Image (cartoon, rainbow, N blue to C red):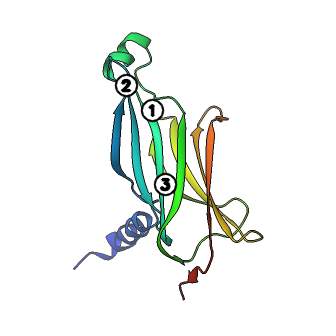
Amino acid sequence: MIPAVLRRPLAAAVICLAALPASAQEVGRVGVDWIGNDIIIEALPDPKVQGVTCHVSYFERSTLDRLVQGNWFEDPSNSSIACRQTGPITLGDIAKGPEGEEIFRESRSLLLKTLRVTRIYDEANNSLIYLTHAAELTEGSAKMSISTVPLWNAGVKP
């Protein structure tokens, strides 16, 4: 039996974990130079849209590059995204406002920078737009990439 004083914080923690963005699986790694810098490719299934998978690529600096450049704690903001239908599309309970809904977040520095993927529903064109960009605590980044998935014959979960 869990004491009453611990039930509320425990319930809050479970709710927070359930609301976390999707996790990605590394599917490719390409070396780009002799000092060990790589381009990473990850598969990211949309957690609320069955049948859509995004592939996100980004640059990962090697330890040697971090030592040489003197900037130990952060990777560049560059990223790219491609999203496709990978099965029958079924829309879950997705955000439909113009600000969209974050579906993925991954740290790109010790504290200040994250790589994010946001889904935006384009009702007028019956499409989903996926935007990848870096978000920084101190300043934004203009480096971004988008991909769209048409919703032809997409089902809606009850």
Tell me which corner region of the image, top left, top right, bottom left or bottom right, holds residue 109: top left
- Figure check: 155 above or below 107: below
Q: Which of the two labelled residues, at mark 1 and mark 3, occupies the earlier sequence position?
A: 1
Q: Which residue does the image show at 25% across and 76% down from the upper left?
A: 2
Question: Percent x, y for residue 118?
Answer: 59, 55
Tell me which corner region of the image, top left, top right, bottom left or bottom right, holds residue 137: top right
Secondary structure of the residue carrying tag 2 is loop
Q: Nearer the viewer, mark 1 or mark 3?
A: 1
- Where, quadrant-wise, is the N terminus in this rendering? bottom left
Hey, which residue is sitting farthest bottom in the picture? 158
Q: Are marks 2 and 1 in contact (CB under 8 Å)?
A: yes
Question: Percent x, y for residue 28?
Answer: 34, 43
What's the amino acid at mark 3?
Answer: Phe
Q: CA distance from mark 2 to mark 3?
A: 23 Å
- 52, 60: nearer the viewer: 52
Determine if residue 28 is in view: yes
- Picture disc at residue 59: 1
Would residue 1 be found to the left or right of residue 157 on screen? Answer: left
Hey, which residue is sitting farthest right in the picture? 124
**Mark 3, residue position:** 104
Q: Which of the two labelled residues, at mark 2 and mark 1, occupies the earlier sequence position?
A: 2
Q: Which of the two labelled residues, at mark 2 and mark 3, occupies the earlier sequence position?
A: 2
Q: Which residue does the image show at 53% across and 57% down from the upper left?
A: 83
